[in-house]
Image: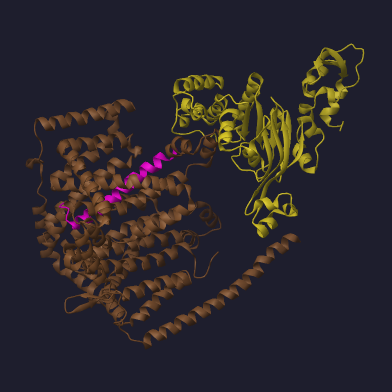
Chain colours: A brown, B yellow
Amino acid sequence: MAAVSVETLPEQESAAVVDARRNRRNVAFGVFALLAVLAVVIEHEVPGWLDLDIQQRAQAAYKWTITNRQTSPLFTLFLEPVGNVLQWMFDVVMNVLEFLKWPGLVALTGAIGWRTGGLRAGIGGASAMLGVGMISNWDHAMITLAIMLVAVFIALVLGIPLGIWTSRSDRAERVVRILLDTAQVLPIFVYFSPVQVFFGIKVPPAIVVTVIYALPPAVRLTNLGLRNVPVVMNEVGESFGANSWQQLLKVQLPVARKAILLGLNQVIMMAFGVVVLASLLGTGDLGQDVLNALQKQKVGEAAAAGLGIVLLAISLDRITTGDRKHQFSRWSNLVPKVSRQAGQRIAVGLVAVVVLLAHVFDWTTFPSWLTIDVAAPINDAVTWVQDNFHDITQAISDFLVTNVIDPIYKFLLWLPWFLVVVAIAFIGFLSKGWRLATGVGLCMVLTAALGTIPGGVGRERIWDIAMNTLSQVLVAILLSVLIALPLGILAGRSDAFERFMRPFLDIAQVLPAFVYLIPVVFLFGVGRSAGVVACVIYAVPPCIRLTTLGMREVPYTPREAAISFGATGPQEMRMVQLPLARKSILLGINQTLMMVLATVIIAALIGAGGLGLVAYEATAKPNIKLGQGVTGGLAIVLLAIMLDRITQAWGTSKQGGNHQ
Amino acid sequence: MISVRDLWKVYGPRAERIVGAPEADLPRSQLEAQHGNVVAMREVSLDIAPGEVFVVMGLSGSGKSTLIRCITRLIEPTAGKVFIEGQDVTAADDDQLLKIRRHKVSMVFQHFGLLPHRTLLDNVGFGLELRGVDKKERRERADRTLALVGLPGMGEYKPHQLSGGQQQRVGLARALATDPDIMLFDEPFSALDPLIRREMQDEIVRLRRELGKTMMFITHDLQEALRLGDRIAIMRDGRFVQVGTPAEVVLEPADEYVANFVRDVPRSHIVPVDAVMAPPSDGPFAGEVSADTKVRDVVALVARSELPVRVVRDGMTVGSIDRVGVLSVIAGEDH
């Protein structure tokens, strides 16, 4: 009898809870309806008095930093020394790279790859590195590499202790995670103006920006590695009387070593994706080669530099993946097995000999007989494609702009501004509840309050520019999901299809977003539809990957149960696998959306306009436009937070008001 | 050697107020729903003599793992006292606690808990390393201990190269290497297959004979408990329901629960002859056995002859047992 009463109790409660929830919901709907009516009644344009005047304030702050750079302790005691140390570290790395000379670096890459991932990784890494020199400007590539290496070093020096700390304190983990996640979600242009204020131009600010993105994976993977140390390992240490330090150094870190090293690869790839964009700060590296060529519409030159970036990325990826499963391939049967110590000695010796030879024969500059001119044939191809396919690509491009992007953009502009705020807040409420609704509503009001900037004719409202960017984001995410979701679901159910897709996805994962702009310009020219296409190309592979992962994470037991009851394949998918994979797929869409936003912003480089342009224009002329840069950056931050929080809520909670 | 007095472990908010209070007697689900507390172990008291093997037996969730972890405070008990060689462990400060863990007690774990990045030698020398023993000495001692558990010369192997049984031999060696007075075993053999498990039990019996350590042994396997234990504590819902020798537990189960447990145990395997023998007769006898011989080991003697067997303790004849006596134990008629 007791058991029965225990079972009925929660049901009665939940009936009351359901009632209360329905009431709260009705109240909420009423509130939103009232607000919507209000929005239509009041001024449809953003009112003039709603202006925080960020621009003037930021410009004034910048003026202050210029006049006080020599005197304020903030600069003389902190920022300048930090900047100097960064510059010094960069110089040291450059000196080492110059000392190695190009043959030495190729040999070193091969040696590291061989020792960490087997012969195949070594050969792959070394040939990719050689390819960098063959195709693009070696000296510029070395600048890219040096900035990245310094940034990775700093990210590790800061990230590993932070990771250790967060693994030992749940509260620290929460705080650090929110900070780092937010920092990482924001598109890179946001940081350009502030780091220029604090660190000037060229290398130091580029390193700082890169560290911002490389730090989160370093912290996250150290934290995760340490938290995943099995309980029994910790008990072993404790039971034999390890104190806190011994526990960390002798048990936890060694056990977590593999996971942390795997993180190194992610840290490097993340840093790499950022470093080529940080070239906009004037570092003179490969990224800038791409940019300069793109702006002159020289697709061949841009592609050559872009390929250099790709090869550098592949090289670094190969030698840091540490994937030992390839070690027993047919390559390794060709050489005799050696012990670990012997292998290390051989590797060091090999590199030393190559460096010595390079010095004796003075192989300083990359020899011209080794270079391949890829620009000319690509330019020819571009001409040919443009001659033959121009009509088709132009038609697609025009269709996208006139029939898809523009109608959405104009609709958003036509809507009363406050109605947009209310609508987004309402979506926030449906996604999670009042707190999210208030948060995203506030984001939008603040965006409206950013005022105006000097535009083509007179002044342009930031709100309008934000709607431009938002319309591009919406179109790009819609197209990406429409393409990626079916492919991802298919790959989640068919092993053969997944095997077929894998190589494409693997390569796509390594390439920085920047690189995707090149073929897009080549096919679609410049403008908003080119930007949207670049976003889709960049975002589709990870979206497929995440969808597939979500599908494959579903445990087999419930699926098997459904099949045993006679469910057909499609029934099982619709009734079991998809519902169970729903949350992870939605979280995947959240990540895809953030990648789309980041790409929409950098698509300003190929004429997509929007907030990206507002922020990016300013980096070239901080003296007069820094205020504009900060304003644009803030608008991007607000948009990013709004989009991120709403879609994240889809993946984490079930419905509005459901706190179970 | 080990004394435990009124030990409690309660999880959840303000756990102390549950100890000894009427709330502790609430049904498990009700206590958790109303106060958010779970009583994992309650009012446990025990004394383990030097050289004794004390087995704690119970099903999963009975609190036995909690108990063994409270001995060296891997889990902090909520209330009660633990003494090791008279020293109050529960009152020890951090330094004293480290000393106890490094010198007096060592533990063998269910899933071995070998450190995957270390060689066997460095795994076995782990406790000595924490203690600050220099490298040369700890490697020597680790080498000797590995030989003791039957893995001589395998010091440079890594744990993943070994079978489960071999890995647990290393776990055993690691616990022995610090030469502790007390060894704690947390279901050390439950992850091994039956043949290997039996082999490892023999190993424990041998080590105990040779080294005379005091042992506390956790298991959910009754056969294992009966084979190894000088005394057995049966645990259920966080408390001891019976503590006694194997014969006492099998012959006089304290309640229904224990009775159910031991129902299928063949008595003749457990009962010593002096528990069922008749008064000494004048003979003649078919043979002679010592008083602690198990009844089943007399079967061969009485099967060969009509005559009874003489039971001897310390050279004195204390009784006799004949075919009928043996058969009645096997048939379970005497109790």
The answer to whether residue B154 shows anywhere in this view is: no
Side of A13 relative to A313 (left or right): right
Camera-side residue of B304 and A394: A394
Could you tell me residue A2's position as x and y percent? 75, 60
Q: Main secondary structure of the magenta part?
A: helix
Q: Measured from the top left, where is residue A622 in percent x and y?
A: 18, 64
- Relative to the observer, which residue lies in front, B208 or A554? B208
Q: At 32% across and 85% down in the image, what residue appears?
A: A44
> What is the residue that sits farthest to the bottom in this orientation?
A41
Q: In what quadrant of the picture does the C terminus of chain B appear?
A: top right
- Locate residue A153: give its quadrant: top left
Q: Nearer the viewer, residue A366 or B298?
A: A366
Q: Residue at x 14, y 67 (%)?
A: A390
Q: Nearer the viewer, residue A193 or A250?
A: A193
Residue A44 seen from this side: yes
Residue at the extreme front of the image, as rendered:
A71
A211 over A187 or under it: above or below: above
Disc count in the image? 0
Q: Is residue A222 above or below residue B200?
A: below
Does the stretch in magenta take in A277?
yes
Q: Position of residue A322 (x, y in %)?
A: 33, 39
Q: Is residue B247 shown left or right of residue A639?
A: right
Asked if residue A181 lies left or right of residue A398, the reply is right
Q: Is residue B136 above or below residue B183?
A: above
Question: Does the magenta portion include A536?
Answer: no
As drawn, is B275 to the left or to the right of A121? Answer: right
Rendering coords of residue A594 (x, y %): 33, 62
The magenta stretch is: A255-284
Quadrant into which the N terminus of chain B falls:
top right
